[in-house]
Image (tube, coloured by chain):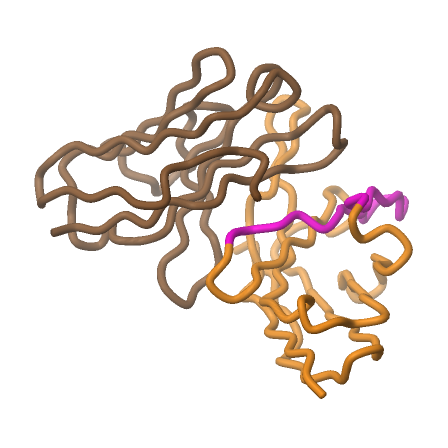
Chain colours: A brown, B orange
Amino acid sequence: QSVLTQPPSASGTPGQRVTISCSGSSSNIGSNYVYWYQQLPGTAPKLLIYRNNQRPSGVPDRLSGSKSGTSASLAISGLRSEDEADYYCAAWDDSLSGWVFGGGTKLTVL
Amino acid sequence: QVQLVQSGAEVKKPGASVKVSCKASGYTFTSYGISWVRQAPGQGLEWMGWISAYNGNTNYAQKLQGRVTMTTDRSTSTAYMELRSLRSDDTAVYYCAGDYCTNGVCYPGVWGQGTTVTVSS
């Protein structure tokens, strides 16, 4: 049972916009930054979004992050086949004094 | 470029210990910390703990307290994670992740390729 809650799956067709939600609590998302990672099959996670809505260099601007209260979301516009992957949200948890992750959302491009 | 390279796959019997290494390159090793994260087959990510490569301070996940030890060797820019009293549910891919820091806030930024640890009798 993950501390952060994500939908197990999401899908869209090429060119569409999809959003993935991440719900937490006051001790994690409510008081700290949210981060998003992409994990392609058989590979290590890759940082996509840091500090709620910042993109590392090399991450396209069709990916965006947002946060409101104890929830966050990742939006992917102009969906492409290479976006098919697992996506994880993460945040520092003040009560646990450690990083917590969502259970992951498997994105399928139809 | 910043890179973390981990040691190879391990197969261990229940009750044994495993030690995974993570060699850093492309940055000043002692400037940042290293987190360890594991992923059981078909499951999500689980944070195991963090070590400062500067002074060796550690912060372990409560669930693993007493079974895990994280260390660093500054002379070789390598971090280590040892897990003892292995059980079948410790079977997972183990990742090291180096900190990225922006404006004083640090987070797991660059990840190693992962090390598969299989616990089986």
Residue B71 appears in the rendering: no
Q: Quadrant of residue B101?
A: top right
The answer to whether A106 is drawn above or below residue B9 in the figure is above
Q: Is residue A98 above or below residue A23?
A: below
- A98 lies left or right of A35: right
In the picture provided, is B83 more to the left or to the right than B121?
A: right
Taking B87 as reference, is A72 left or right?
left
Residue B98 in picture, x, y percent from top left = 64, 49
Residue A48: x and y in percent read 41, 40
Query: Is residue B29 within the magenta segment?
Result: no
User: In the image, is residue A31 above or below residue A34?
Assistant: above
Residue drawn at x 65%, y 33% is B106
The residue positioned 69% from the left and 65% from the top of the image is B22
Residue sitting at 47 percent across and 53 percent down? Answer: A45
Q: What residue do we see at 73% from left, 69% from top?
A: B21
Q: Position of residue A14 (x, y in %)?
A: 9, 45
Name the image quarter holding the C terminus of chain B: bottom right
Q: Who is closer to the viewer here, B78 or A95?
A: A95
Q: Residue furthest top?
A: A69
Judge by depth and name the residue closer to the eye, A28 or A37: A28
Kindly give the residue lying farthest to the bottom in the view shown.
B121
Quarter of the rendering containing residue A49: top left
Q: How many marks on residues?
A: 0
* Whether residue A11 is visible: yes
* Residue B49: image location, x then y, percent: 75, 48
Is residue B47 magenta-colored? Answer: yes
Say if A41 sits above or below A97 in the image. Answer: below
What's the magenta region? Answer: B44-62
